[in-house]
Amino acid sequence: MDKLFVTVLCMITISACTRTENGLVFGVPDYEKRNIKVSQIDLMILLNTNEQLSTEEDWINNKQRACTGKPPYNLHCALETASKIVDGKYIHRHHALQEVRFSIDDSFKIDGPFIG
């Protein structure tokens, strides 16, 4: 094979990849796809988040990501806490959390992916 051809092929392949928290993936990472099926755990995380933010006193309006683990919570910390309670761990791009991001994107008609 011609060296130029191989170089161009490699460049095209790399440009079709997306850098994720877990390294490079070819094409669109799963967490950016809106057709992923949610699981029972996803629903339980969302229900637990809803319980944590059930009253105005439970909410705090800040954008900090350093969570204290106790109320009041912002949305990020409530989702993180619910993930740990339900699933035993926090995964930033968990399907349940992505669905919340998609809903925010749709509600506010944000162009491009929500960074959060």
Image (tube, grey):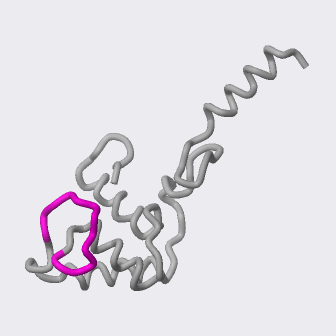
Does the stretch in magenta take in 54?
Answer: no
- Magenta includes 61? yes
What number of labels is visible?
0
Residue 116 appears in which quarter of the rendering?
A: bottom left
Q: Residue at x 75, y 25 (%)?
A: 9
Main SS class of the magenta portion in the image = loop
Residue 8 image point, x, y percent: 73, 20
Q: Position of residue 95 (x, y in %)?
A: 47, 67
Toward the right, the furthest residue is 1
Residue range in magenta is 60-72
- Please state, as top left, top right, bottom left or bottom right, where the N terminus lies in the image: top right
Residue 79 coordinates in the image, percent (x, y): 33, 72
Residue drawn at point x = 16 percent, y = 77 percent:
72
Q: Residue at x 25, y 74 (%)?
A: 68
Q: Is residue 3 above or below residue 15?
A: above
* Left or right, residue 82 beside residue 26: left
| In-front residue for pair 85/95 | 85
